[in-house]
Image (tube, rainbow, N blue to C red):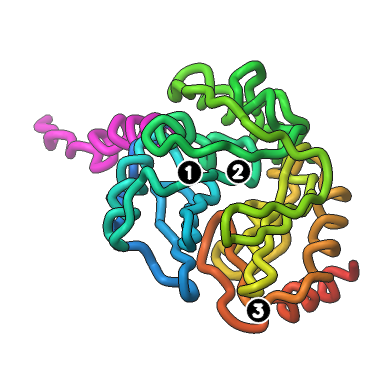
């Protein structure tokens, strides 16, 4: 009896490619090239779209960076600085919202290239300086356990993190005077032990890191990503007490209008 030749499975070639893509994603390979010209959020405040997270730039007499994206995003940040007519050497400080590698992956490179001082929460210092891996942080629920496994694989197999020294470790809420840039550093732990948000009172803008999310719309932090979810919600309540119009998240689109009101409504909808 004649047999029809077996048709090739259309997924056969795709499966290895899919595995390869999954392996490369956490290694910091950019999904798309970060733009050289950053997105203007407000006068003197820019967003640079990194491969996995947002990077922000505040331009006054000095330049202040907030977070640095994944490994591989640093050169795009340097090009973006030049794209607004400034020089990397004008960056005096890098503020770190928290110690996860999608926010600190290019920290060592940018510190080296700019000479900027690094300011971060004391609770995340060991992770930023490479003494501990972020997979050691607690995570909430079963989803959190899966997340820890993914982080462990990311940090031990796929991703080579270059530690960076922290010049100033924040212990509590602090007002920072960075030349003409006035910043209130707000302790907002929960997503990580040493998470901080940074508030510009003169511009009514807050940078929340991952204390809130903008994916795919503004929302409270996902429980599996939090080291302590109750603490994370308490931090969102703290953020909501500040008077700001614009909220810049670590991931997703910034809220550009009535941001404090929207965040308060998110808490109310959650019954917090």
Residues at circles 1 and 2 in contact by the CB criterion of under 8 Å? yes
Relative to residue 172, is residue 39 drawn left or right? left
Vertical side of 113 occupied by 222: above or below: below
Q: Which of disc 1 and disc 3 is earlier in sequence?
A: 1
For the magenta stretch, what is the residue range? 1-26
Q: Which mark is residue 96?
A: 2
Q: Residues within 10 Å of mark 1 (few under 14, many from 20)?
A: many
Q: Secondary structure at mark 3?
A: loop
207 within the magenta span: no
Which residue is at 41% across, 30% downward?
112
Vertical side of 49 occupied by 8: above or below: above
Among the 4 quarters of the image, the one containing residue 148: top right
Where residue 175 appears, x then y in whole percent? 75, 54
Q: Which of disc 2 and disc 1 is earlier in sequence?
A: 1
In the picture of the structure, the residue carrying the numbered disc 1 is 68
| Visible residue check, residue 31 | no
Q: Which mark is residue 245?
A: 3
Q: Residues within 10 Å of mark 3 (few under 14, many from 20)?
A: some
Where residue 60 appears, x then y in whole percent? 48, 63
The one nearer the camera, 25 or 167, is 167
How far apart are the alpha carbons under marks 3 and 1? Answer: 24 Å
The quarter in which the C terminus is drawn is bottom right
Q: Which of disc 3 and disc 2 is earlier in sequence?
A: 2
Relative to residue 124, is residue 47 drawn left or right? left
Relative to residue 87, is residue 105 drawn left or right? right
How far apart are the alpha carbons under marks 2 and 3? Answer: 22 Å
């Amino acid at each position: 009896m004649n047999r029809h030749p077996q048709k090739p499975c259309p997924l056969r070639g795709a499966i290895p490619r899919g595995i390869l893509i999954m392996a490369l994603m956490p290694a910091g390979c950019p999904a798309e090239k970060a733009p050289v010209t950053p997105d203007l959020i407000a006068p003197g405040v820019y967003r640079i779209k990194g491969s996995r997270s947002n990077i922000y730039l505040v331009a006054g007499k000095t330049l202040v960076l907030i977070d640095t994206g994944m490994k591989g995003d640093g050169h795009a940040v340097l090009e973006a600085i030049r794209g607004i007519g400034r020089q990397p050497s004008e960056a005096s400080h890098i503020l770190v919202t928290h110690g996860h590698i999608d926010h600190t992956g290019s920290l060592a490179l940018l510190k080296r290239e700019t000479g900027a001082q690094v300011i971060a929460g004391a609770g995340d210092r060991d992770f930023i300086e490479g003494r501990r891996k972020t997979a050691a942080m607690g995570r909430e629920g079963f989803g959190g356990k899966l997340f820890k496994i993914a982080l462990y694989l990311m940090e031990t197999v796929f991703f080579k993190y270059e530690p960076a020294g922290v010049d100033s470790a924040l212990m509590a809420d602090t007002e920072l005077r960075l030349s003409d840039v006035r910043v209130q550093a707000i302790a907002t732990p929960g997503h990580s032990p040493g998470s901080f948000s940074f508030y510009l009172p003169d511009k009514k803008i807050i940078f929340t890191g991952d204390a809130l999310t903008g994916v795919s719309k503004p929302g409270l932090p996902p429980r599996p990503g939090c080291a302590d979810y109750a603490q994370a919600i308490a931090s969102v309540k703290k953020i909501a007490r500040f008077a700001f119009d614009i909220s810049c998240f670590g991931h997703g689109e910034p809220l550009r209008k009535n941001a404090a009101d929207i965040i308060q409504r998110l808490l109310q909808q959650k019954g917090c």
